Amino acid sequence: MSVGDGSINPLTNREAVAFAPDVYWIGAMDPSLRTFDIILKTANGTSYNAYLIRGSEGIAIVDTVKEEFADEFFARLESVASYDEIKVIVLNHLEPDHSGALPQLMERAPHAQLYISQRATGMLKGLLKPRNGAFGYTTVLTGDQVSLGDRTLRFLHTPFLHWPDTQCTYLEEEQILFSGDVFGCHFCDRRLFNDKVGDFHFSFDYYYAHIMRPFKQHVLEALEIIEPLQLKVIAPTHGPILRDRPERYVKHYRELSTSSLSGDRGNGDKSLMIFYMSSYGNTARMAEAIAAGADEIKGVRVSLFDLEGGEVDPFVDLIEGADGLVFGSPTINGDAVKPVWDLLSSLVVINLRGKLGASFGSYGWSGEAPAMIEDRMRGLKMRVPLSNVRVKLIPSEEDLANCHDYGRSIGATLIGKPTENQVIEFADLI
Ligand SMILES: Cc1cc2nc3c(=O)[nH]c(=O)nc-3n(C[C@H](O)[C@H](O)[C@H](O)COP(=O)(O)O)c2cc1C
Ligand SMILES: [Fe+2]
Ligand SMILES: [Fe+2]
């Protein structure tokens, strides 16, 4: 065993690291990992953090490690405890990077009871069925607690951060929050603690952007129960243990989860964003006419972007704050053009459910692109109530007038007056 003063190197040493009285890190370091879960780059690897708490009436283990790192985890566990002392095993999240060593741990710890969230039960069977589907377990909700004698673990139900099963666990007496992937990041540093490791703020934000951001609403709900806690330490399942001013990370999560764009508009206007690509200018002219039409609708703020002139990431941020999205693409070889697909495929990190979608484009003979874009929008759970507008080759004045009307219809639908086109507004006649 070692104290968390940076004197131990977990890359070469397999001892537990204490960071509060009788509370230990017993995780594993994975410094050579470069890609995590397909979608995340990990420039300096990651860690799988697991924890051990000793109480007067037994030991609790919180989370385990990826299966291939089980030896390291068990060696650290054995450096401070024996298996028959373990009374409680908490799995805050069942993704294999944390449940990998669970089957072996359950076999080794005959007196242990497993505590998981209600939503984790199906996953437990799904993930561990080839090994052993017959674990006994107790499901817990916010407020439920388990005693280790002089120590109490209290559970917080924080679903969808970032899987349905996720929860956090709070050690009352030491004010330590075992937060699972929440407040975690892929940053492998043998110095273990946020006041000792290298600069990990990019990794922290990057992890949030790719893992937590699609679930912002759930993050805000979880913060409602995390913010009132007294926190001495946040102990996540990846990256540094946050013992120096942990409340900063909670505050940062709230900032990251609160949209600033709607604040910019301030007046309740709906934001409509039109993105297009055009080789000869045909789809571009349609885009301008649609934008002009939508702009006539009061309460709609229209923005127009040529995908050729932009980078994907800033557009993703803009789209997150938008209420309606319109994509224009010519049909090239029976498809929409690549920048449109690139942007659409980058939107998995944000929640698009319920945003209004529409599409348009110029074409030569078959004109598949707009319908394909609509299909993709529906797949992303957007609503697409108006069917697309297509123009064969160069738009005529009449075509442009139709596009203008289409823009008006989109704008009217966005503010909840979908029949406006058919209604003659007295103000329009003056
Ligand atoms: C390489 C190439 C492939 C094309 N493939 C198709 C096609 O599969 N189906 C179609 O309807 N039009 C096709 N077109 C025609 C374009 O969709 C048409 O020229 C359109 O007006 C271009 O609009 P833009 O000026 O907005 O790019 C193709 C054009 C080019 C240059
Ligand atoms: Fe995870
Ligand atoms: Fe994880």
Image (cartoon, rainbow, N blue to C red):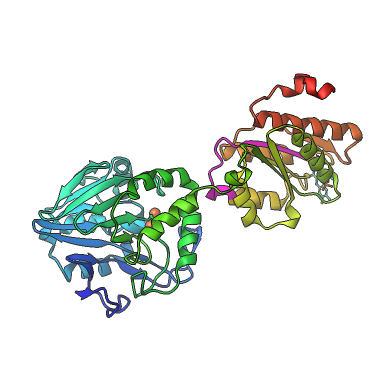
Report the front residue among 298 and 123: 298
Residue 322 in the image, given as x and y percentages of width and height: 62, 42
Report the front residue among 378 and 53: 53
Which residues, given as a range, are shown in magenta? 347-360
Report the front residue among 133 and 262: 262
Report the front residue among 79 and 178: 178
Queried whether the magenta region covers residue 359, the answer comes back as: yes
Residue 183 in view in this figure? no
Taking the image as shown, residue 211 lies to the left or right of residue 263, namely left
User: Residue sitting at 75 percent across and 57 percent down?
Assistant: 309
Where's the N terminus, which quadrant? Answer: bottom left
User: Residue sitting at 59 percent across and 47 percent down?
Assistant: 261
Q: How many marks?
A: 0
User: Residue sitting at 63 percent across and 55 percent down?
Assistant: 314
Q: Is residue 258 above or below residue 48?
A: above
**Residue 242's quadrant in the figure?**
bottom left
Where's the C terminus, which quadrant? Answer: top right
Taking the image as shown, residue 114 lies to the left or right of residue 166, namely left
Q: Dividing the image into four equal quarters, which quarter contains ligand 3?
A: bottom left
Residue 41 in the image, given as x and y percentages of width and height: 50, 64
Residue 239 in view in this figure? yes
Taking the image as shown, residue 192 lies to the left or right of residue 328, namely left
Queried whether the magenta region covers residue 141, the answer comes back as: no
Residue 263 in the image, given as x and y percentages of width and height: 58, 45
**Residue 323's quadrant in the figure?**
top right
User: Residue sitting at 37 percent across and 45 percent down?
Assistant: 224
Looking at this view, name the residue that lies furthest to the right. 397
